[in-house]
Image (cartoon, helix red, strand yellow):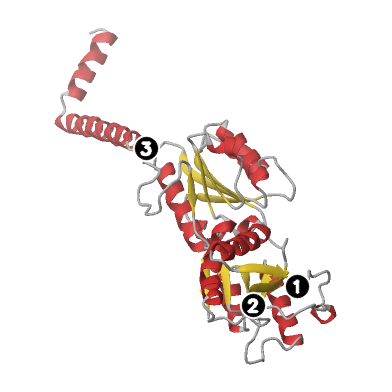
């Protein structure tokens, strides 16, 4: 018998052995199951890049959006460097990574122009963007992948005007000088991005109710003790929380809160906590930015975008094109 015949005979006996056949069958089945498992994992996205949402904020931007609400799986926070209009290096590396898929970005910075510049860089890479804080330019919002969630200062001024002007007109709030004018002074006219527009809208809303106004002095100093008044004002307005503290300090220094017909103190407080504090300290009313609703709306939008669903699913706030306008809220004592 030749060596070749011997080998063939041995192989034939080996493969006809029942135990060998069982082992081979088991190995074939195991390989088939393993292959099916790999195919199933691939079909279910097991090997796809991890979907993420990046949240870009700076120190001021966090006043308009609660960054803590995005401390969850699937969100990556990036703190912007001061005065930088460039995407952070870590974000640029993320855009090039094969392990991550950037599904959307959230931006909240101190200025609308800065937010818009950052948004454009991401939109050029086909990344949907949701913005908060100061509004970007109209050109940015013409992109169907760009959304804005914010508030108009004028709406807050109108809300406070509605609350105070009718009462002044109807005599519920006193006309201290019997001159049929709402005489006022203002603190903090440039304190926040809302301040100037808020105060102007308030005064205009008063005029809509037939309550005309007259300024009885401008504040040129931060020290309330050095302020001299040409007349007793019916109202001290403030454009921000610091202005509110100064307004109450002036009213206390001049004894305007202790008379039978005290001067009113009211204005814009930025946060709900500041509004409550100022009202508790003697302010009649304070308007504040609804950061809770803004943040909830942004979260819902980016969740929908990341899941590639219709952006407005689950939102009960109507959109104006690509924008959501969240009203400023009024806190009264």
Left or right position of 95 against 253: left
Between disc 2 and disc 3, whose residue precedes?
A: 3
Q: State the CA–CA distance, disc 3 to disc 1.
A: 68 Å
- Residue tagged 1: 216
Q: Residue at x 73, y 76 (%)?
A: 246
Q: Which residue is mark 3?
A: 45
Q: Please tell me in which quadrant of the rendered image residue 89 appears.
A: top right
Image spot of residue 298 (x, y percent): 48, 52
Between marks 1 and 2 in the image, the one whose residue lies nearer the viewer = 1
- Give the quadrant of residue 120: top right
**37 and 86: which is toward the camera:** 86
Answer few, some or many: residues within 10 Å of disc 3's Cα (few below 14, many 20 plus, some between 14 and 19): few
Q: Secondary structure at mark 3?
A: loop
| 40 to the left or right of 84 | left
Q: Which mark is residue 244?
A: none
What residue is drawn where x is 46% and y is 47%? 302
Q: Secondary structure at mark 1?
A: loop
Q: Residue at x 66, y 40 (%)?
A: 87
* Residue 65 visible here: no
Label 1 and label 2: CA atoms lie apart by 15 Å
- Identify the residue under disc 2: 265
Q: Earlier in the sequence, mark 1 or mark 2?
A: 1
Q: Position of residue 224 (x, y in %)?
A: 79, 79
Closer to the observer: label 2 or label 3? Answer: 2
Q: Relative to 247, is 118 above or below? A: above
């Amino acid at each position: 018998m030749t060596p070749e015949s011997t080998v063939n005979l041995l192989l034939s006996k080996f493969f006809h052995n029942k135990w060998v056949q069982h082992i081979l069958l088991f190995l074939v089945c195991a390989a088939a199951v393993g292959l099916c498992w790999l195919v199933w994992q691939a079909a279910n996205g097991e090997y796809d890049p991890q979907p993420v949402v990046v949240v870009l904020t700076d120190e001021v931007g966090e006043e308009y959006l609660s960054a803590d609400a995005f401390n969850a799986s699937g969100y990556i926070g990036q703190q912007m460097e001061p005065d930088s209009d460039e995407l952070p290096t870590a974000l640029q590396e993320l855009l090039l990574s094969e392990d991550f898929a950037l599904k959307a970005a959230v931006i909240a910075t101190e200025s609308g122009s800065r937010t818009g510049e950052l948004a454009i860089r991401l939109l050029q890479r086909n990344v949907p963007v949701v913005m908060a804080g100061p509004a970007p330019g109209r050109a940015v919002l013409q992109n169907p992948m760009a959304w804005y969630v914010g508030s108009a200062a004028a709406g807050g001024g109108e809300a406070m005007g509605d609350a105070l002007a009718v009462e002044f007109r109807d005599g519920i709030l006193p006309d201290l000088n019997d001159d049929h004018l709402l005489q006022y002074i203002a603190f903090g006219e440039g304190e926040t991005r809302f301040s100037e527009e808020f105060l102007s809208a308030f005064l205009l809303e008063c005029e809509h109710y037939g309550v005309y106004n007259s300024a009885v002095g401008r504040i040129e100093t931060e020290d309330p003790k050095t302020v001299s008044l040409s007349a007793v004002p019916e109202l001290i307005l403030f454009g921000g929380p610091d202005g509110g503290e100064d307004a109450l300090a002036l009213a206390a220094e001049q004894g305007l809160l202790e008379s039978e017909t005290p001067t009113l103190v009211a204005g814009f407080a930025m946060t709900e906590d500041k509004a409550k504090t100022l009202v508790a300290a003697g302010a009649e009313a304070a308007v504040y930015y609804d950061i809770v609703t803004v943040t909830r709306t942004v979260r819902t939008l980016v969740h929908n975008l990341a899941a590639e669903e219709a952006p407005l699913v689950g939102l009960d706030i109507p959109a104006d094109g690509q924008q959501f306008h969240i009203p400023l809220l009024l806190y009264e004592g």
